[in-house]
Image: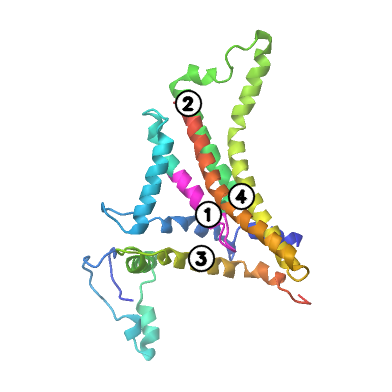
Amino acid sequence: MNENLFASFIAPTILGLPAAVLTILFPPLLIPTSKYLINNRLITTQQWLIKLTSKQMMTMHNTKGRTWSLMLVSLIIFIATTNLLGLLPHSFTPTTQLSMNLAMAIPLWAGTVIMGFRSKIKNALAHFLPQGTPTPLIPMLVIIETISLLIQPMALAVRLTANITAGHLLMHLIGSATLAMSTINLPSTLIIFTILILLTILEIAVALIQAYVFTLLVSLYLHDNT
Amino acid sequence: MASVVGIFSHSSVSVPVKDKKLLEVKLGELPSWILMRDFSPSGIFGAFQRGYYRYYNKYINVKKGSISGITMVLACYVLFSYSFSYKHLKHERLRKYH
């Protein structure tokens, strides 16, 4: 039980080569592009959704921040589709791997910080000291603010990994509990099955919310630094 | 499948047909037909591209495409991942001896 609980999180390999690359390259096949104004139903719904989310996300940025809109919209689409595809049975979710989330979080966060330091260096450094602190507290507060800045990419990556991994694990456990109880006691099986259904609905929500949170925080860091 | 060159996304793209389709090849000619196929990287990529557009134009790029166009793809994805994880799953069967 212990070994195969985590077996679904092992990155799949074909003869030693990572098949996880194929899993990451699969979502773009579900999102076609088109050069026409009026399209089929799939493209129309997807374009409507993308327009909705991009308008919602990019209104708070100025002109310089809006140059990041392609990056942020593709980020939220990628994380949302990858998380939702991971809810299908037996599939592999690349966002459960900390390595991938770190690879997404660190360059984006570093990009926003470097952009802030390059353009308006005084404003960027001013983030380290909140207004109106008593003078004796200043050194300690600078240290605390620096640590809170440096921990932002780690928090982004670990938040996404932990949420998705915990959800998948919980579904595995409750699913196997349902199967085990089905031979012993039928009413409790129905209760546990109801819990499983509620958990699946929660997981769908979590998949979308995590994508949203990740992207929102990156855009927030961007807003601070433009 | 007809052997075509170039991007094959819709029928008004004019392409020369070089060869017979698979269903028209006689059984004795099958080894020579397979050897005549283009197995270079660009040939394989062209085969994937043709397959993608064949599915896309039949099920998704139609006036009233239904949800089955995409659920078929997801079902194949589930079966594909099942075959990948079969190695771990076969230990979880309900048997007395594993």
Dot 1 falls on a residue whose secondary structure is helix
- The answer to whether residue B82 is above or below residue A156 is below
First of labels 4, 2 by sequence position: 4
Q: Residue A87: say if magenta.
A: yes
Residue at 36% across, 75% down: B37
Q: Which residue is mark 3?
A: B77
* Percent of width and height locating residue A36: 26, 53
Tell me the CA gap for discs 3 and 4.
20 Å
Q: Residue A172: say if magenta.
A: no
The subunit letter for the residue under badge 4 reads A
- In front here: A118 or A26? A26
Q: Which residue is mark 4?
A: A164
Residue at 33% across, 69% down: B58
Q: Is residue A13 visible?
A: yes
* Percent of width and height locating residue A120: 45, 20
The subunit letter for the residue under badge 1 reads A
Amino acid identity at mark 4? Ile
The subunit letter for the residue under badge 3 reads B
Residue range corresponding to the magenta coloring: A74-93
Q: Are the residues under marks 3 and 4 on the same chain?
A: no
Amino acid identity at mark 2? Asn
